[in-house]
Amino acid sequence: MNERITYKDPVTGYEIARYTNGPMRNAKLYFTTENFTTDDKYFFFNRANDEGDGGLYRANVETGECTLVAEPEYKGFCMDRFENYGVIVKGDEVFRIDADTLEKTKIGDLPKGGNVTGHLTIANSGLIATSYHLASKIYALVTLDPKTGKSETVFMTDQWLGHAQICPTDDNLIFYIHETMGDAFQRTWMFDVEYRQNRPYYVEHPNEWITHEVWAADGSEIAFMKLPGRVLIGDKDGRHFDIVAESTQLLHPCLSRDKKWIAADRINYFGSDVQEGVVLINRETGKVKDLAVTGRCKTGGDHQHPSFNRKGDKILFSAPDENGIAQVCVIDLNQVERP
């Protein structure tokens, strides 16, 4: 399959490469996992329609050739931040996928009868962690050691857990949220695996709306949103926070691997009416530059969710088409005068 075309953004004038075409929904991986292989030659995306067709695909950045990696029954794919592989779930079974050969190898089992509530995440030790809905309908944080193939339920609660992300460089820490599909009294939490203790990460005050958090690749800090439109970055321990940017309707901030740049999207929320699209932010100065405009997202799954390649010179994003359905695009930052 090859649907790659290039076009000039009608507002910014930058050249965009689009790799997919409707009517199927084609969405990049969520911005809380790496999307590119270690050599930046390929990226991964999900393709689906209402009939359940599609699956996980790998696209060649240069040629546009797309290859089916895993059928729709596989869920929760994520890439390792340091090595060239990903992990994915089919039922209760967890598989490792070699990003070069696309070979699948079973590496373990999650608790029987449950479901992941997001994508898997991997620490540099190889330990896998995810938020999970157990067969008993209790929500949990679950880890899996690929060396033994065994999983362990390390935390349980009645609260819907989501966005679980093990620290990339410290497998003792798992960040997660209380998922409400909206605001929460206290959304962000950090779990200490060794001591089995959880604590608020960013302690919320009344009328604060904190959302869409992501670890830096080196595990030293977390970027997140304080609605409306503020990007904050906090240290690993949740003791110090800085506002690094503020603009209209920002959402989903993603740090480059060198932590100097942030990609984010503009999205309509709180009844606003703005041109949706993708922006680049200079972390040091807080300056924001528009890169691309898109159609208005039909669903949350069609959000732009921009993220950098590993080198930091390209941004991958979902671009909702005229029907609001996500299509996968890349902008080369070498053509951009950075803010």
Image: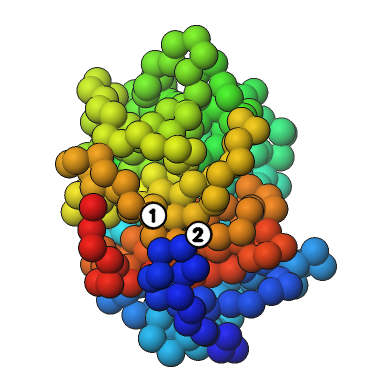
Q: Are marks 1 and 2 in contact (CB under 8 Å)?
A: yes
* Relative vertical location of residue 233 with respect to residue 129 in this rendering, above or below: above
| The N terminus lies in quadrant | bottom right
Horizontal side of 301 relative to 66 (left or right) equals: right
> Could you tell me which residue is drawn at 75 percent across and 67 percent down?
49
**Residue 41 visible in the shown view:** yes
Name the spot of residue 272 as percent of width and height, x first: 60, 36
> Could you tell me which residue is drawn at 55 percent across and 27 percent down?
178
Between 178 and 211, the one nearer to me in the picture: 211
Secondary structure beneath label 1: strand
> Could you tell me which residue is drawn at 68 percent across and 50 percent down?
299
Name the spot of residue 233 as percent of width and height, x first: 29, 34
Horizontal side of 190 relative to 212 (left or right) equals: left
Q: Label 2 sits on what residue type?
A: Val
> Could you tell me which residue is drawn at 44 percent across and 11 percent down?
205
Secondary structure beneath label 2: strand
Disc ID at residue 86: none
Q: Label 1 sits on what residue type?
A: Asp
| Quarter location, residue 134 | top right
* Relative vertical location of residue 60 with respect to residue 303 in this rendering, above or below: below
Name the spot of residue 78 as percent of width and height, x first: 46, 59
Name the spot of residue 32 as percent of width and height, x first: 43, 50
What residue did someone put label 2 on?
293
Horizontal side of 307 relative to 118 (left or right) equals: left
Between 16 and 274, the one nearer to me in the picture: 274
